[in-house]
Amino acid sequence: MIPLIKIKIDEEEKKSVLDVLESGMITQSKKVAQFEQEFSELCGTKYAIAVNSGTAALHSALYALGIKEGDEVITTPFTFAATANAIIMLGAKPIFADIEEETFNLDPKKVEEKITSKTKAILPVNLFGHPYEVENINELAKKYNLQVLEDACQSVCAKFKNKISGDFGDIAAFSFYATKNMMTGEGGMITTNKEEYAELAKRFRHHGQSEKTKYEYLDLGYNYRMTDISAAIGICQLKKIKELTKKRQKNAETLTRGLSGLNGLITPKTKDNNEHAFHQYTLRITEEFGISRDEFSEKLKEKGIGTAIFYPKCLHLHAHFSRFGYNKGDFPVAEKISQEVLSLPIQPYLQETELNKIIKVIRGLKDE
Ligand SMILES: *Cc1c(COP(=O)(O)O)cnc(C)c1O
């Protein structure tokens, strides 16, 4: 089987974790501080605040932006549930807007149509590792006096012009879940250039205590702290992440070259001025291909190629989100795309023979 996802823990990671365990300092301490410092350098932001999941990062970031009950936050219906759930956690309302076919990311024109007097923030996702429409969305935010929270859970090391993911909007949220491009088992990070947001995020991860004045509870908070055990893994992962990203990008190039010219198969695009981090390599299988997306994935499985569908159903069509007043047909592009997408293996440990097999098997489907 050529797996969609491969997680490799090397000797250095094992040793670092063991060192932390033996030190007896296993909760948030020096390793977390070091991880935060080094992660902020990677993203080119002033601050990085470690938490224990991407969901916690999104929740804390929205809190830092001052999102509260009755506010509206505009986001995409074509994402993982955590993106929209973080909005609901603060009592705010997720307002979905449709996406662009080309990148699967929020369509700035559709976002603008959704802005009301209650809108406080835009929450674009760099889906599969492709940056959101940074310039257009940031301009909208400026024009309507809104904040931008970048969901960077899939986009570590992605770039737009000279900016690195984590620094595209006012604040960003990363996930280090085991299957993400870099991981700490479970984990997350908030990045920002604003001192106030950094301070509020730190407070939120620690029951509303300011780290400056201990045992003064200033507001509601949670226990979102990262352990030094996780941070030790994160520090090791940071040393490899640029190299691993390059391998993903190279694998994507190989697949795109090998899969070109097949009618009904659309390979992922990278817009000008953007660098894709390729968390997922996501194809579209349209009607012209001749067999359905689901048959396509079944045939790949028979030949030992792992695939997955991210995401088979848009958020607004799930009971949990449709209760906000959404119906089938509200976001036609996202709904169509969810029926066409299929992610192929792109992980950095793929061998050339495996990439060639994937290409050969897919090209073979056309001749059957
Ligand atoms: C993974 C992911 C999250 C949530 O991260 P967790 O660490 O699993 O909580 C949020 N948004 C997107 C787009 C993700 O891919």
Image: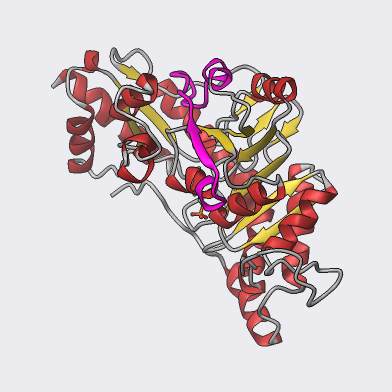
Counting from the top left corner in percent of width and height, residue 11 is at: 58, 69
56 to 92, vertically: above or below: below
Residue at left offset 20%, top offset 33%: 294
273 w.r.t. 162: above or below: above
Q: Quadrant of residue 310?
A: top left
Answer left or right for 213 relative to 115: right
Q: Which residues are magenta?
A: 87-113
Q: Quadrant of the C terminus?
A: top left
* 330 or 268: nearer the viewer: 330
Above or below, 13 relative to 88: below
| Residue drawn at (64%, 67%) of the image | 226
Lateral position of residue 321 relative to residue 106, left or right: left
Give the answer, above or below, for where 313 lies relative to 6: above
**Residue 263 quadrant:** top left
Give the colouring mode of the picture. secondary structure
Q: Residue at x 75, y 71 (%)?
A: 217
Viewer-nearest residue: 175 or 233: 175
- Does residue 186 appear in this view? yes
Percent across and percent down for residue 313 are: 31, 36
337 with respect to 148 (left or right): left
Residue 278 seen? no
Q: Position of residue 228 (x, y in %)?
A: 67, 73
User: Residue 145 magenta-drawn?
Assistant: no
Give yes or no for residue 98 being in the magenta stretch: yes
